[in-house]
Amino acid sequence: MEENDLRDCYAMFAMLGMLIDGSQTAGMKAIAQGAYEMADEMLEARKPKESAGLPAIRRRVKKGE
């Protein structure tokens, strides 16, 4: 899936959540813009952080395995 398709998919689900929640009192244009802003944040969150990471983890092997 291309990034633009993923962005549209994220925005669709974000907008659906906002509409189901019912707390959004803004107009449809504002809700749509908010959904794309949320989608952009979701795409940003998917990017790996350079400083974040775990050292290699080795599986412990019990004696007799």
Image (cartoon, rainbow, N blue to C red):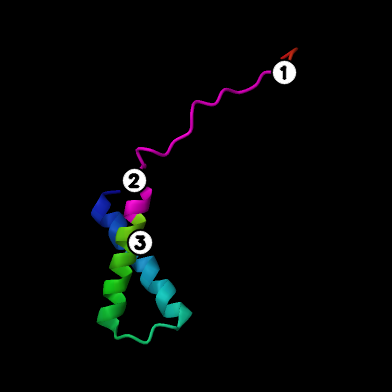
Query: Measuring 31% from the left and 78% from the top, which residue is drawn there?
Result: 31
The quarter of the picture where the C terminus appears is: top right
Callout 2: helix, strand or loop?
loop
The quadrant in which residue 30 appears is bottom left
The amino acid on which the numbered mark 1 sits, given as a three-letter code, is: Lys
Q: Label 2 to label 3, Cα distance in Å? A: 15 Å
Q: Nearer the viewer, residue 13 or 56?
A: 56
Q: Residue at x 32, y 85 (%)?
A: 26
Residue at (50, 25) in percent of width and height: 56
Residue farthest to the front, as pictured: 51
- Reply yes or no: does residue 57 show up in magenta: yes
Q: Which residues are magenta?
A: 43-61
- List the single residue furthest toward the top: 64
The x and y percentages for residue 61 are: 67, 18
Identify the secondary structure beneath mark 3: helix
Disc 2 residue type? Lys
Q: Residue beneath label 3, please?
A: 10
Q: Is residue 52 above or below residue 22?
A: above
Q: Is residue 24 above or below residue 46?
A: below
Point out which mark residue 47 bears: 2
